[in-house]
Amino acid sequence: MHKDYAERACIALVLFPTGDTVGAVNDSQQALIGNHPGFDQAREAADVLAERLDCPRHDIGVVLGSGWAHTIDSLGEVTGEVSFDQVPGLGQDGVAGHVQKISSVRLPDGRQSLVFGSRTHYYASRDTQAVAHVVRTIAATGATTVVLTNGCGGLDPQLQPGTPVLISDHINLTGTTPLVGAEFVDMTDAYSKRLRAIAKQVDPSLTEGVYVQFAGPQYETPAEVAMAGTLGGELVGMSTALDTIAARHAGLEVLGISLVTNAGAGVTDAPLSHEDVIAAGESAAPRVSKLLADIIHAI
């Protein structure tokens, strides 16, 4: 592990009795423990961000999905920005509505937040390590918490486009994982009950739902949406579950929030289009972005 990373992140080093592994330990939990092949690249990316953003440590990470981009306007003072293509392991995806930049934002209480305007999607290259790189980099900057957001389809007709929903759990239907080998990660409390309770204190009207990740990029068929509902899902999309697996493996506490941008296929007779998803997100942006900023301030 890079010596300057340990100094920057204000963390301690511990030796584990199971071997020579040296791990980074935050104030209250362990981050990037072990020798997963993606951890060194995450530390390299964190070094680049520290230099380019002139910020040695971040306290909380945020990943903004479809419909959430304007959150940064309410979050705090932007103290630095860098594009994805300037950071090792990241690249532009060219998808409309995805903001390919990383911002360092000073929150009102003085904490520093690292905000990814988008994520690396599994459908872009079928590379789970590229997907995991965002949250691993967040952990490598010293953060202990990550807020993951997305735009999704809703299975409940009462979940109108523009409705934010806390993710209580997920079902991973991608058929893959960012973990390699015998990396047994407890996913019982994948989406932190503590953080969800904080979110509900900010807005008691928030509901919860199980998110189902499909591989994409095609939208789900009505039969697939019906299957997701039979399995216990209430939200469907093409991200977040793989991110969360990697985040928990990296030692991060996770809060997940979906923005319903459309009804799932077959829930209504309306066809699905990316343009409609973007339009629904833009329409809801002022309200949900302020809500998300308030939640982050309360964490």
Image (spheres, helix red, strand yellow):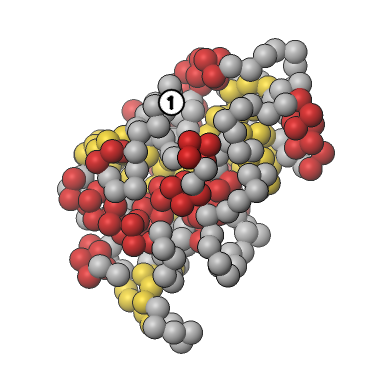
Q: Is residue 131 left or right of residue 23?
A: right
What's the residue at 65%, 48% (across, down)? Answer: 175
Quarter assignment of residue 213:
top right
Whether 112 is drawn above or below 20: the answer is above
The quadrant the N terminus occupies is: bottom left
Quarter assignment of residue 20:
bottom left
Residue 261, x across and y down, in percent = 58, 23
Q: Is residue 237 left or right of residue 137?
A: right
What's the residue at 34%, 28% (across, down)? Answer: 73
Please, what is the three-letter code of the amino acid marked with disc 1? Val
* Residue pointed to by mark 1: 95
Task: Tell which residue pokes out farthest to the top in this image.
Answer: 270
Callout 1: few (<14), some (14-19), or many (20+) C-alpha neighbours within 10 Å? few
What's the residue at 58%, 64% (across, down)? Answer: 185
Residue 153, x across and y down, in percent = 64, 27
Disc count in the image?
A: 1
Q: Is residue 44 left or right of residue 20?
A: left
What's the residue at 39%, 27% (across, down)? Answer: 94
Whether 245 is drawn above or below 17: the answer is above
